[in-house]
Image (spheres, rainbow, N blue to C red):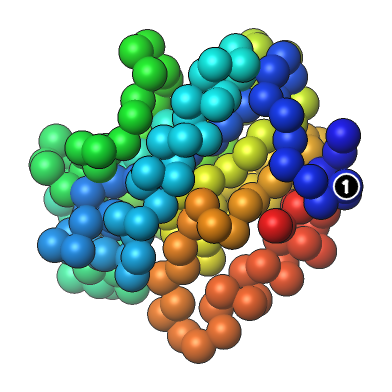
Amino acid sequence: MTAADGERFAYGPGTALVVVDVQVDFADPGGSLYVSGGEDVVPLVNAEVEAAAAAGSPVVFTQDWHPEHTPHFAVDGGIWPVHCVAGTPGAELHPALVVPEGAPRVRKGTGAEDGYSGFSELDLASGRREATVLGDLLDSHGVRRIVVVGLAGDYCVKATALDGAARGLAVQVPLELTRFVQLADGDDERAIAEMRSAGVAVL
Protein backbone atom coordinates (compact mmCIF):
# COMPACT_ATOMS: atom_id res chain seq x y z
CA MET A 1 0.00 0.00 0.00
CA THR A 2 1.27 3.52 -0.75
CA ALA A 3 0.13 7.00 0.16
CA ALA A 4 -1.17 7.41 -3.37
CA ASP A 5 -3.69 4.65 -2.75
CA GLY A 6 -5.66 7.05 -0.55
CA GLU A 7 -6.23 4.26 1.97
CA ARG A 8 -5.18 3.96 5.60
CA PHE A 9 -1.75 2.58 6.20
CA ALA A 10 -1.59 -0.70 8.05
CA TYR A 11 0.61 -0.26 11.08
CA GLY A 12 3.59 -2.51 11.55
CA PRO A 13 7.25 -2.59 10.53
CA GLY A 14 8.24 0.42 8.46
CA THR A 15 5.30 2.62 9.50
CA ALA A 16 5.28 5.15 12.34
CA LEU A 17 2.63 7.36 13.93
CA VAL A 18 3.66 10.97 14.56
CA VAL A 19 1.38 12.75 17.03
CA VAL A 20 1.87 16.49 16.62
CA ASP A 21 1.42 18.97 19.47
CA VAL A 22 -1.66 17.59 21.24
CA GLN A 23 -0.88 19.94 24.10
CA VAL A 24 -2.99 21.75 26.67
CA ASP A 25 -2.56 25.20 25.14
CA PHE A 26 -3.87 23.90 21.79
CA ALA A 27 -6.33 21.17 22.75
CA ASP A 28 -8.00 22.63 25.83
CA PRO A 29 -10.63 25.38 25.51
CA GLY A 30 -8.79 27.26 28.26
CA GLY A 31 -5.46 27.08 26.42
CA SER A 32 -3.71 30.24 25.33
CA LEU A 33 -3.78 29.21 21.63
CA TYR A 34 -6.84 26.96 21.61
CA VAL A 35 -7.56 25.32 18.27
CA SER A 36 -11.33 25.08 17.88
CA GLY A 37 -12.38 21.46 18.36
CA GLY A 38 -8.88 20.47 19.42
CA GLU A 39 -10.14 18.45 22.37
CA ASP A 40 -12.28 16.37 20.02
CA VAL A 41 -9.25 14.78 18.38
CA VAL A 42 -7.87 13.40 21.64
CA PRO A 43 -9.98 10.20 21.84
CA LEU A 44 -9.54 9.65 18.10
CA VAL A 45 -5.77 10.03 18.37
CA ASN A 46 -5.81 7.67 21.35
CA ALA A 47 -7.38 4.95 19.22
CA GLU A 48 -4.70 5.50 16.58
CA VAL A 49 -1.93 5.35 19.21
CA GLU A 50 -3.28 2.09 20.56
CA ALA A 51 -3.55 0.57 17.07
CA ALA A 52 -0.02 1.61 16.15
CA ALA A 53 1.49 0.42 19.42
CA ALA A 54 -0.32 -2.92 19.22
CA ALA A 55 1.15 -3.49 15.75
CA GLY A 56 4.66 -2.63 16.90
CA SER A 57 4.87 0.69 15.07
CA PRO A 58 6.91 3.49 16.64
CA VAL A 59 4.77 6.27 18.11
CA VAL A 60 6.45 9.67 18.45
CA PHE A 61 5.00 12.76 20.10
CA THR A 62 6.06 16.31 19.26
CA GLN A 63 5.70 19.29 21.57
CA ASP A 64 6.14 23.01 21.17
CA TRP A 65 8.56 23.88 23.99
CA HIS A 66 9.16 27.60 23.78
CA PRO A 67 11.12 30.02 25.95
CA GLU A 68 9.24 32.88 27.59
CA HIS A 69 10.39 35.19 24.82
CA THR A 70 10.87 34.20 21.18
CA PRO A 71 10.40 35.96 17.81
CA HIS A 72 7.57 33.42 17.35
CA PHE A 73 5.38 35.35 19.85
CA ALA A 74 3.42 38.51 19.05
CA VAL A 75 4.90 40.29 22.09
CA ASP A 76 8.33 39.77 20.50
CA GLY A 77 7.36 40.64 16.93
CA GLY A 78 5.76 37.37 15.77
CA ILE A 79 2.13 36.45 15.11
CA TRP A 80 1.19 34.09 17.95
CA PRO A 81 0.06 34.63 21.53
CA VAL A 82 2.43 33.28 24.16
CA HIS A 83 1.91 29.51 24.26
CA CYS A 84 3.55 26.22 25.24
CA VAL A 85 6.25 27.85 27.35
CA ALA A 86 8.67 25.15 28.51
CA GLY A 87 7.75 23.67 31.87
CA THR A 88 4.32 25.31 32.10
CA PRO A 89 1.02 23.36 32.28
CA GLY A 90 0.05 24.64 28.83
CA ALA A 91 3.08 22.97 27.25
CA GLU A 92 2.23 19.53 28.63
CA LEU A 93 0.59 16.88 26.50
CA HIS A 94 -3.19 16.81 26.99
CA PRO A 95 -3.89 14.83 30.19
CA ALA A 96 -6.37 12.55 28.40
CA LEU A 97 -3.88 11.65 25.67
CA VAL A 98 -2.62 8.06 25.69
CA VAL A 99 1.20 8.12 25.79
CA PRO A 100 2.80 4.65 25.77
CA GLU A 101 5.57 4.18 28.29
CA GLY A 102 8.90 5.11 26.76
CA ALA A 103 7.41 6.79 23.69
CA PRO A 104 9.85 9.48 22.51
CA ARG A 105 8.99 13.16 22.58
CA VAL A 106 10.50 15.63 20.14
CA ARG A 107 10.49 19.12 21.65
CA LYS A 108 10.80 21.96 19.18
CA GLY A 109 10.95 25.74 19.12
CA THR A 110 13.12 25.72 22.22
CA GLY A 111 14.94 28.92 21.26
CA ALA A 112 14.61 31.48 18.48
CA GLU A 113 13.02 28.95 16.10
CA ASP A 114 9.54 28.71 14.64
CA GLY A 115 9.04 25.12 15.78
CA TYR A 116 6.33 24.28 13.24
CA SER A 117 7.69 21.03 11.80
CA GLY A 118 8.57 17.98 13.83
CA PHE A 119 11.50 17.44 11.43
CA SER A 120 13.11 20.89 11.25
CA GLU A 121 13.18 24.33 12.79
CA LEU A 122 13.74 27.72 11.17
CA ASP A 123 15.81 30.09 13.32
CA LEU A 124 13.83 33.30 13.01
CA ALA A 125 16.82 35.47 13.90
CA SER A 126 19.39 33.98 11.50
CA GLY A 127 17.16 32.36 8.87
CA ARG A 128 19.05 29.08 9.30
CA ARG A 129 17.08 25.81 9.22
CA GLU A 130 18.24 22.92 11.39
CA ALA A 131 17.02 19.34 11.67
CA THR A 132 15.44 17.99 14.85
CA VAL A 133 16.05 14.46 16.08
CA LEU A 134 12.85 13.14 14.49
CA GLY A 135 14.35 12.14 11.14
CA ASP A 136 17.20 10.18 12.72
CA LEU A 137 14.81 8.60 15.19
CA LEU A 138 12.55 7.31 12.41
CA ASP A 139 15.55 6.18 10.35
CA SER A 140 16.78 4.13 13.29
CA HIS A 141 13.50 2.17 13.16
CA GLY A 142 13.61 1.70 9.39
CA VAL A 143 10.52 3.85 8.93
CA ARG A 144 9.41 4.45 5.35
CA ARG A 145 5.84 5.63 5.96
CA ILE A 146 4.32 7.96 8.54
CA VAL A 147 0.82 8.85 9.64
CA VAL A 148 0.71 12.43 10.92
CA VAL A 149 -2.08 13.46 13.30
CA GLY A 150 -2.66 16.22 15.84
CA LEU A 151 -2.69 20.02 15.86
CA ALA A 152 -2.93 22.09 13.89
CA GLY A 153 -3.61 21.05 10.33
CA ASP A 154 -2.65 24.34 8.69
CA TYR A 155 0.61 24.79 10.60
CA CYS A 156 2.49 22.11 12.54
CA VAL A 157 0.74 19.08 11.03
CA LYS A 158 1.19 20.52 7.53
CA ALA A 159 4.83 21.44 8.10
CA THR A 160 5.62 18.00 9.53
CA ALA A 161 3.86 16.25 6.64
CA LEU A 162 5.65 18.37 4.01
CA ASP A 163 9.05 17.76 5.60
CA GLY A 164 8.32 14.04 5.80
CA ALA A 165 7.44 13.94 2.11
CA ALA A 166 10.59 15.92 1.27
CA ARG A 167 12.60 13.22 3.07
CA GLY A 168 11.12 10.63 0.72
CA LEU A 169 8.67 9.15 3.20
CA ALA A 170 5.15 8.14 2.27
CA VAL A 171 2.97 10.43 4.37
CA GLN A 172 -0.69 10.27 5.32
CA VAL A 173 -2.76 12.90 7.12
CA PRO A 174 -6.25 11.72 8.13
CA LEU A 175 -8.37 14.88 8.37
CA GLU A 176 -10.57 13.53 11.14
CA LEU A 177 -7.48 13.42 13.35
CA THR A 178 -6.59 17.11 13.04
CA ARG A 179 -8.17 20.55 13.39
CA PHE A 180 -7.21 23.88 11.82
CA VAL A 181 -6.32 27.28 13.31
CA GLN A 182 -7.67 29.21 10.30
CA LEU A 183 -6.10 32.60 10.92
CA ALA A 184 -7.61 33.50 7.54
CA ASP A 185 -10.62 32.04 5.76
CA GLY A 186 -9.62 29.16 3.53
CA ASP A 187 -6.37 28.34 5.37
CA ASP A 188 -7.60 24.76 5.76
CA GLU A 189 -8.25 24.33 2.04
CA ARG A 190 -4.91 25.91 1.13
CA ALA A 191 -3.07 23.65 3.56
CA ILE A 192 -4.76 20.54 2.17
CA ALA A 193 -3.95 21.59 -1.40
CA GLU A 194 -0.32 22.27 -0.51
CA MET A 195 0.08 18.87 1.16
CA ARG A 196 -1.55 17.04 -1.72
CA SER A 197 0.61 18.82 -4.27
CA ALA A 198 3.65 17.57 -2.33
CA GLY A 199 2.44 13.97 -2.55
CA VAL A 200 0.91 13.71 0.92
CA ALA A 201 -2.18 11.51 1.11
CA VAL A 202 -4.76 13.72 2.81
CA LEU A 203 -7.87 11.72 3.66
Q: Could you say whether the residue bearing mark 1 is in a helix, strand or loop? A: helix
Tag count = 1
Q: Residue at x 67, y 34 (%)?
A: 146
Residue 142 appears left or right of 16: right
Q: Residue at x 33, y 70 (%)?
A: 36
In the rendering, at what x and y percent does residue 123 appear?
45, 50
Residue at the farthest bottom position: 185
Quadrant where the N terminus sits is top right
Residue 79 appears left or right of 106: left
Residue 158 appears left or right of 151: right
In the rendering, at what x and y percent does residue 153 appear?
52, 61
Q: Residue at x 73, y 41 (%)?
A: 8
In the rendering, at what x and y percent does residue 124 appear?
42, 57
Front residue of 128/85: it is 85
In the rendering, at what x and y percent does residue 48 appear?
52, 35
Quadrant where the C terminus sits is bottom right
- Residue 11 against residue 75 in the figure, above or below: above
Residue 6 appears left or right of 119: right
Front residue of 41/81: it is 41
Q: Is residue 97 visible?
A: yes
The picture quadrant where one finds residue 137 is top right
Front residue of 185/162: it is 185
Q: Which residue is mark 1?
A: 5
Residue type at tag 1? Asp
Badge 1: few (under 14), some or many (20 or more) residues near its Cα, within 10 Å?
A: few
The picture quadrant where one finds residue 188 is bottom right
Front residue of 26/155: it is 26
Q: Residue at x 65, y 76 (%)?
A: 190
Q: Is residue 116 visible?
A: no
